[in-house]
Image (cartoon, rainbow, N blue to C red):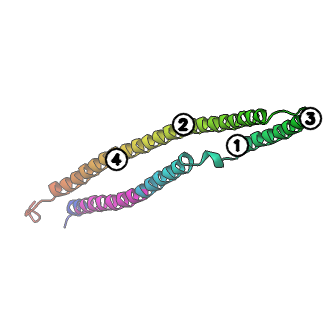
Amino acid sequence: MTLPMIMTGINGALGLYSTVKGLIDSAESKKKQNKLRRAAQNEENAWYRRNYYANFMDDSASKAAIKRVENTLRRNNEQERARSIITGSTPELSIARNEQGLRTMENVINNLAVADSNKKRSIDAAHKQNNIALMNAEQQQLSLDERMARSAATNGYSLMQNALLGAKWGKEGKK
């Protein structure tokens, strides 16, 4: 065998090795990327469920606001009872004042519900943006994978073609 034949064989073998190694490495990388992408999507969905479906009445700020209103209503009722004893007011007046206190509590609950609705809208918008970002990242990765696969195939084909063109099939002994 002559040196050009040996070099041609080495070139072909290196081309084949490079192509196979690239395919194996690419497959491993793709598995890791898919695992990471699934983890990111799962984390995003968990964040969304945790925040969107949270009970606004269990929130510490909501509990504190309700507690403040309850304390204020209790103090007002105590003062009204004391005033009623002193002034001799009618039961209808006490009922009217209790209704006013209930309306105050209703307003607080309504305001908390409106704030929760606004919070849910912003959480929903953030979730949609995060999902779009994840889809765009996946689309970019798929596009890159396609270009890299096409490039690897072209390079592997070129190396194999060069190796085949460099061999003198049936003319090894002839000069």
Q: What residue type is labelled 2?
A: Ser
Please tell me which of labels 4 and 2 falls first in the chain: 2
Nearer to us of marks 3 and 4 is 3
Q: Is mark 3 on a helix, strand or loop?
A: helix
Instruction: Select label 3 or label 2 by which is in front.
Output: 3
**Which residue, given by chain and number where applicable, does mark 1 sit on?**
61
Q: Is residue 103 left or right of residue 79?
A: left
Left or right: residue 76 compared with residue 149: right
| Residue at x 30% of width, y 45% of height | 147
Q: Which residue is drawn at 77% across and 41% down?
A: 68
Task: Name the residue nearer the viewer: 118 or 130.
Answer: 118
Instruction: Find out whether residue 22 is within the magenta segment.
Output: yes
Q: Range of the magenta residues?
A: 9-32
- The residue under label 4 is which amino acid type? Leu
Is 160 one of the magenta-colored residues?
no
Q: The N terminus is located in which quarter? A: bottom left
Residue receiving disc 3: 86
Name which residue type carries label 3.
Ile
Tag 2 or tag 1, which sits nearer the N-term?
Answer: 1
User: Which of the marked residues, 3 or 2, is nearer the chain's N terminus?
Assistant: 3
Residue in the image at 38% along x and 56% along y: 30
The CA distance from mark 3 to mark 4 is 81 Å
SS assignment at label 2: helix
Mark in front: 4 vs 2:
2
Nearer to me, 37 or 3: 37
The percent coordinates of residue 166 (x first, y second) are 17, 56
Q: What element carries label 1?
A: helix
